[in-house]
Structure formats: structure tokens, C-alpha cells
Amino acid sequence: EFQPDILESYPSMLFEVARALELNPNLPRVRVRYVVCVGEMLSEAARKYLHEQFLCPVYNRYGAEELGAVAGECKEHNGMHLNVESVIVEILDERGNPILDGGAGRVIATDLLNFNMPFIRYETGDSGRIDSSPCACGLSTPRIFIEGRYTAFLTTARRRIHHLEIDSALDSFMNQIIQYQVAKISDGTSNTFNTTF
């Protein structure tokens, strides 16, 4: 009834809406010009699925509740352009030293517009890299590539497994696995992968 131009939400929520539309052809189709994903990592498999179901471009946006919108994708979908007029973003190593352009590290942000409760060099908890090379879209602002939460580890009796290792192991199955969840059952070595096919 509302017929919005843009549909914006978490990728997981948009995925559920798209899945409901796919499984229930009698539901009214949602016709939007753009889908915008926020608040969670957007995988390429999820982007492809959302594009197929909503029949429109799917964009990714990076931000934080404390900072607002930090960056957003252009039509090239090759990183997200930083909102340099409202936030300063730095990439630091574990000791707090700046990392050169293109190197991955901790994403640190300073909000330039919040005068009531300023966030200066705010530790986002995310890992990423910045690329200052020209973008094919013509925008000159640097692009950020978010690689995930650097604090997201699964610890077993033998080792710590970063969530990106799990993502990497499952990338080759991206056309077969719709969703997955890793559940730690105990403090021992027994861990389970719950997947939805």
C-alpha cells in the first residue's frame, strides 16, 4: 500500500522479506528503486539474492548508532565512500599507530557533527581498510572496506577462530548455503555448524 522508493534494513531482515516473497508468490510484490543494507555485514551471496528478489540495485551503508552514517556505496559497489564532511576515519594497528592507505586494521572514527556528546577517536570494534585511489564513479572521497568485527572470535580448547576464517571456509558454498550459525556447545572442542540449505 505504501509503495516506498527505498527499502532499508538489516541484511538479515531484508533476506527474510525476500525469502517470504519467493516462497509465497501470492504476496503482493514489493517494487522499490533501491535496497539499502545497514547494521550488519552484507555478503555477496546475500546481495545477489536480494537483487534477484527485489529486481533493483542493492547498496551497502556503513555507520554506527553513536556516529550515524559513516560511508555509503556508489553505483560501482567497490567499497563505501566516506562521509568526509561529517566524520574522520582512521585505520590503526593494535598499538594505535596509523596504517598506510590500503592496509587493514582497527576502524577508529571521530564525529564532527555531534556537539552535545562528541566521539573523538571512537573505537568502533570493526576491522577494515581505506583506499584513497580514484573510484570509477568519479567521486574523489576515500572508500572504506569493512572486513568485520575484530572482536568476534570463537574460542575452543585448542585455538581462537576469527569469524572471517569461518566466512572464508564457507565462501565456496555461497550458492548452496542460505544462512549459517555457529554454536559453541561447551568449553571443550565440541562445536557445531547449524546451516539452512
Image (tube, grey):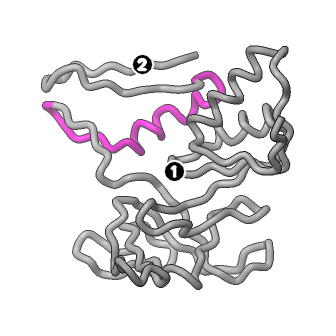
Q: Secondary structure at mark 2?
A: strand
Would residue 162 be counted in the magenta stretch?
A: yes
Q: SS class of the residue under badge 1? A: loop
Residue 160 shows which numbered tag? none
Q: Which residue: 76% across, 23% down?
A: 21
Instruction: Please give the range of residues in magenta.
Output: 157-177
112, 178: nearer the viewer: 112
Quadrant in which the C terminus appears: top right
Q: How far separated are the C-alphas under marks 1 and 2? A: 23 Å
Establish if 26 lies above or below 147: above
Q: Is residue 72 above or below residue 38?
A: below
- Amino acid type at circle 1 is Gly
Where residue 143 appears, x then y in whole percent? 60, 72
State yes or no: discs 1 and 2 in contact (Cβ < 8 Å): no
Residue 6 in the image, given as x and y percentages of width and height: 77, 50
The single residue placed furthest to the front in the displayed view is: 1
Q: Pick whichever, 16 or 96, lies toward us.
A: 16
When the figure is inspected, residue 153 is found, relative to residue 105, above or below; the finding is above
Residue that label 1 marks = 39
Magenta-colored stretch includes residue 161:
yes
**Which residue lies under the disc numbered 2?**
194
Please say if 22 is above or below 70: above
- Residue 78: which quarter of the image? bottom right
Tell me the mark number nearer the camera, choosing from 1 and 2.
Answer: 1
Give the amino acid type for the residue marked by disc 2 in the picture.
Asn
Please give left or right for residue 30 compared with residue 8 in the image: right
* Residue displayed at 66% across by 48% down: 8
User: Residue 196: where, in percent of width, then height?
Assistant: 53, 17
The residue located at (64%, 36%) in the rendering is 14
Going from N to C along the chain, the mark reached first, 1 or 2, is 1
On the image, the x and y values in percent for residue 56 come to 83, 44
Q: Quadrant of the N terminus?
A: top right
